[in-house]
């Protein structure tokens, strides 16, 4: 799983010692504790649940935060950690980024002090599981078309609707659920695991993201206290870009390894590379336009700066 030769964009020279250390820690974790799990878990369509608290112990959930036991590293370091997790399996990265940058981030930024004290320590440590329920059957992750509704009823909200492709919804101790209120405004609602009117079912038989536990879930007159509405939608473009880089590096490394080991059905390594390129829709095996990941790294260094506001 060597990556030096895959640094086509010259990112390494841009990193600080702290960022390299964070990346290398994630890389060792993947190599020593995760790789042997991937094939059997992928075939079984199951996630290795013991890795959930292990990721927390390593400080990989929302590591850019500086409170609640988080590591306090840079945004770029966070992106590099996600890149390493994505390199081995998208389901592993999905667990870490959904629990961290979505569930933990939303509660940390916009939850009440009581919600933060109740949920964040367990989520950061991985002893508790969170999910982020945005995507719907008919509209994907477009909040504009969202059909799930939150109707105010005294000191409660009543949720009705459904969500689909929600990571860990069936086992999550706490869910950040997105719905439109009576005025059509989108808001986030903190819903506990055993809230009456909530049910979920895992999606089986997937061809992709097999190791990730993804679910459909339904809210049928799900009644929650009004103080549970305290969130807004966080976005992390740096992480998304570096997630893709991890996936890309893994694909190229696998193709290069296959090609270097001689023939496939009698074809030479060069022919195999050509076949791979053809399968990729004619995309060149050697990356072009090398500026974008560097911009991503530079963007990561700006996040959190007083002059930079993502919202």
Image: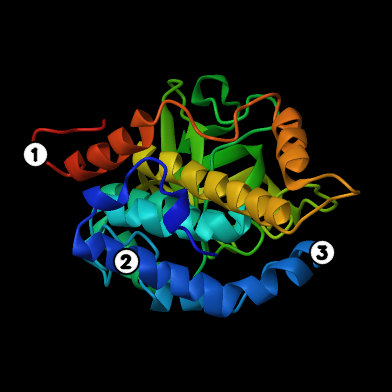
**Residue 134 in sight here:** yes
In the rendered image, the vertical position of residue 79 relative to residue 136, given as above or below: below
Q: Disc 2 marks which residue?
A: 22
How are the residues colored? Answer: rainbow
Q: Kindly state the secondary structure of the residue where label 3 is placed.
A: helix
Q: Position of residue 259 (x, y in %)?
A: 71, 50
Q: Disc 1 marks which residue?
A: 306
Q: Position of residue 163 (x, y in %)?
A: 65, 40
Q: Can you tell which of label 1 and label 3 is closer to the viewer?
A: 3
The reply to whether dot 2 and dot 3 touch (C-beta < 8 Å) is no
Quadrant containing the C terminus is top left
Whole-angstrom CA distance, mark 2 to mark 3, is: 30 Å
Q: Quadrant of residue 104?
A: bottom left
Q: Which mark is residue 43?
A: 3
Quadrant containing the N terminus is bottom right
Q: Residue at x 62, y 29 (%)?
A: 140
Q: Residue at x 32, y 66 (%)?
A: 22
Q: Residue at x 22, y 65 (%)?
A: 18
Whole-angstrom CA distance, mark 2 to mark 1, is: 24 Å
Report whether 302 appears left or right of 161: left
Q: Quadrant of residue 21?
A: bottom left
Q: Kindly state the secondary structure of the residue where label 1 is placed.
A: loop
Tell me which label, 2 or 3, sits earlier in the chain. 2
Q: Residues within 10 Å of mark 2 (few under 14, many from 20)?
A: many
């Amino acid at each position: 799983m060597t990556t030096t030769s895959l640094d086509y964009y010259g990112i390494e020279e841009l990193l600080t010692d702290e960022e390299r250390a964070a990346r290398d820690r994630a890389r060792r974790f993947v190599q020593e504790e995760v790789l042997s799990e991937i094939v059997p878990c992928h075939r079984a369509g199951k996630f290795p649940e013991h890795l959930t608290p292990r990721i927390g112990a390593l400080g990989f959930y929302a590591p850019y935060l500086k409170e609640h036991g988080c590591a306090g590293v840079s945004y770029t370091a966070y992106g590099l950690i996600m890149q390493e997790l994505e390199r081995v399996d998208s389901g592993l990265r999905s667990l870490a980024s959904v629990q961290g940058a979505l569930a933990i981030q939303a509660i940390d930024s916009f939850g009440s002090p009581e919600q933060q004290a109740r949920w964040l320590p367990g989520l950061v440590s991985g002893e508790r599981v969170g999910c982020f329920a945005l995507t719907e059957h008919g509209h994907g992750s477009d909040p504009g078309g969202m059909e799930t509704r939150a109707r105010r009823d005294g000191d409660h909200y009543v949720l009705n609707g459904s969500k689909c492709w929600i990571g860990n919804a069936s086992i999550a101790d706490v869910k950040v659920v997105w719905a439109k209120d009576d005025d059509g405004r989108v808001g986030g609602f903190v819903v506990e695991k055993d809230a009456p009117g909530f049910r979920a079912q895992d999606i089986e038989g997937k061809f992709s993201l097999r190791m990730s536990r993804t679910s459909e879930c339904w809210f049928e007159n799900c009644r929650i206290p009004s103080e549970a509405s305290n969130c807004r939608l966080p976005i992390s473009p740096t992480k998304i870009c570096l997630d893709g880089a991890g996936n890309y590096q893994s694909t190229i490394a696998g193709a290069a390894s296959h090609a270097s080991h001689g023939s496939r059905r009698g074809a030479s390594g060069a022919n195999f590379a050509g076949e791979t390129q053809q399968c990729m829709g004619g995309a060149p095996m050697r990356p072009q336009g090398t500026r974008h990941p560097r911009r991503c790294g530079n963007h990561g260094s700006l996040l959190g700066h007083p002059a930079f506001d993502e919202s």
